[in-house]
């Protein structure tokens, strides 16, 4: 039976996942380690409201388990040595250099973890891939671990994480399924069972699915590709709706009632963001290409092409509606995070819309309930479209939504935070230049109510 777990990587996945395992398995000691000292210090903050990942319900779970059987530390070697089971939950971003640049997953952090485990481990370990990885990565990890020469036995499992940010705790507490892939050998099956036993502390057995390693690795990329594909599909229809008088919300409702299609993930938007969808589809496209499957690659690449188009056309529409120039005009952004209820901004559509508007010399003021100015600037600087000083001149964050919108020519809604609905829209209107435009990239606000106040209101897909 597993008594000690180590998780390498204290990010958006490692932190919440391990917090829930620790809460549900008080008999297991869980240590989450990371090289990033600031991040670990934040996980150890006395006030759990200041932990580095904002997720509804997470701070209470950390408060309950931390110091009891949940620990956050920078002592990676020590935690590896002590553990019976090691989760690898490090980042696997798109490569920014060399072969596969801009497409393949960068596995350097994964390999470093494998080498560190190989170097440090003195007793048998089960190594669990929690990060999202290209299919067949387990064989590379195995290669590294099997060459230690010190007789330590390793089993490698794939246990991809399906949580979505903003609902991570709810997803972890009641997952649709837990997927565990492992070797078909008796030792592999034993390793699988030990991980099944951990989840079985709170997940019904019928929701714990076991497969071979490759199916598990590939299922994660497939799930994200299918989900993103639905968003791009409805977004493609949104443009057609705008030209034809159809309403994308009505179309989504109509098709979603077909039980074969289902109603979820059909919300048209300014485009999907987040650290996963784009990265994982690009990775899938790259894998298909390496096997010479060009039609498969092209098929999935179209999901990204459509998403880029959706972000770009949102910005273009703002410019053309504002009489073909936004130069010197104040545009207020409500929302910067890639979706509501998270402080994560990775690949947020807001970044790309802002970038396009800044290139047209707009002045942007941003209000997001959970995102601060330094993050916004760092997101824009990462694109390298212009210098830090130029970005600072073009964009500011405001701590207050009303002053963010004051004297603005237009408001763009980039994230669907619930609180935006409840603002005093009359007060916002009164403070704006006229005509006062709202570009609702999330179809969040009530068109009739806004038009009654006097706004010129445009949403996606109608
Ligand atoms: P993240 O960037 O938030 O966290 C990764 C952490 O790993 C960082 O804090 C980094 O410092 C640490 N790290 C990197 N190399 C290390 C090393 N050698 N030793 C110790 N620490 C190291 O990333 P994330 O969002 O948690 O994603 C992690 C993985 O989970 C990725 O593969 C991602 O695709 C996958 N995933 C993410 C989500 C999500 O919603 N974010 C959901 C499912 C799966
Ligand atoms: C996704 C997967 O859902 C999750 O299973 C996986 O583990 C990680 O990647 P995440 O990126 O956190 O999760 O959030 P998700 O809810 O999937 O949203 C991704 C993006 O798509 C967001 O920008 C969201 O606003 C957008 N989206 C989602 C839409 O535009 N319309 C929809 O109908 C659904």
Image (tube, rainbow, N blue to C red):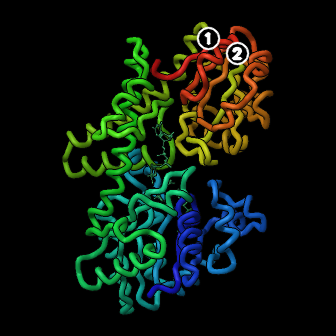
Above or below residue 30? Residue 170 is above
Mark 1 neighbour class, 10 Å CA radius: few under 14, some 14 to 19, many 20 or more: some
Q: Nearer the viewer, residue 104 or 196?
A: 196
Q: Is residue 230 left or right of residue 343?
A: left
Q: Name the residue under label 1.
A: 322
Q: Position of residue 351 (x, y in %)?
A: 58, 35
Q: Nearer the viewer, residue 264 or 38?
A: 264
Q: Quadrant of residue 16?
A: bottom right
Circles 2, 1 touching at the beta carbon (< 8 Å):
yes
Q: Name the residue under label 2.
A: 409
Q: Quadrant of residue 436?
A: top right
Badge 1 element: loop
Q: Is residue 2 left or right of residue 304?
A: right
Q: Which mark is residue 401?
A: none
The residue positioned 73% from the left and 40% from the top of the image is: 373
The residue positioned 80% from the left and 27% from the top of the image is: 403
Q: Is residue 400 left or right of residue 60?
A: right
């Amino acid at each position: 039976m597993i008594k000690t777990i180590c998780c390498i990587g204290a990010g958006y996945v490692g932190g919440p996942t391990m917090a829930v395992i620790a809460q549900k398995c008080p008999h297991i000691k869980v240590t989450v380690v990371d090289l990033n000292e600031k991040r670990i210090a934040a996980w150890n903050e006395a006030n759990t409201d200041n932990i580095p990942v904002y997720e509804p319900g997470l701070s209470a779970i950390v408060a309950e388990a931390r110091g009891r059987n949940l620990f956050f530390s920078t002592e990676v070697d020590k935690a590896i040595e002590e553990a019976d089971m090691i989760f690898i939950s490090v980042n696997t971003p798109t490569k920014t250099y060399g072969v596969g640049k801009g497409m393949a997953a960068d596995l350097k952090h994964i390999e470093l973890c494998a080498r560190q485990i190989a170097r440090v481990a003195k007793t048998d370990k089960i190594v669990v891939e929690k990060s999202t990885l290209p299919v067949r990565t387990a064989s590379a990890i195995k290669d590294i671990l099997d060459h230690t020469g010190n007789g330590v036995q390793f089993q490698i499992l794939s246990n991809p994480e399906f949580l979505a940010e903003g609902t991570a705790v709810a997803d972890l507490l009641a997952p649709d399924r837990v997927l565990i892939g492992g070797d078909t050998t008796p030792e592999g099956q034993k390793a699988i069972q030990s991980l099944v036993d951990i989840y079985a502390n709170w997940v019904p057995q019928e929701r714990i699915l076991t497969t071979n390693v490759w199916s598990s690795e590939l299922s994660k990329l497939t799930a994200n590709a299918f989900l993103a594909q639905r968003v791009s599909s409805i977004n493609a229809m949104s443009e057609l709706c705008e030209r034809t008088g159809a309403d994308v919300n009505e179309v989504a409702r109509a098709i979603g009632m077909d039980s074969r299609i289902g109603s979820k993930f059909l919300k048209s938007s300014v485009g999907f963001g987040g650290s996963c969808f784009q990265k994982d589809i690009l990775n899938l496209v790259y894998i298909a290409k390496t096997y010479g499957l060009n039609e498969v690659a092209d098929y999935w690449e179209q999901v990204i092409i459509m998403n880029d188009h959706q972000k770009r056309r949102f910005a273009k529409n703002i410019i053309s509606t504002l009489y073909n120039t936004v130069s010197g005009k104040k545009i207020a952004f409500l929302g910067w995070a890639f979706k509501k209820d998270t402080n994560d901004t990775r690949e947020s559509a807001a970044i790309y819309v802002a970038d396009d508007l800044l290139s047209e010399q707009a002045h942007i003021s941003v209000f997001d309930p959970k995102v601060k100015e330094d993050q916004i600037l760092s997101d824009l600087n990462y694109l390298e479209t212009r210098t830090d000083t130029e970005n600072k001149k073009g964009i500011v964050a405001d701590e207050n939504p009303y002053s963010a919108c004051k004297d603005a020519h237009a408001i763009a809604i980039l994230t669907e935070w619930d609180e935006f609905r409840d603002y005093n829209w009359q007060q916002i209107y009164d403070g704006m230049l006229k005509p006062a435009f709202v570009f609702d990239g999330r179809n969040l606000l009530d068109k009739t109510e806004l038009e009654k106040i006097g706004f010129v209101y445009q949403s996606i897909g109608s």
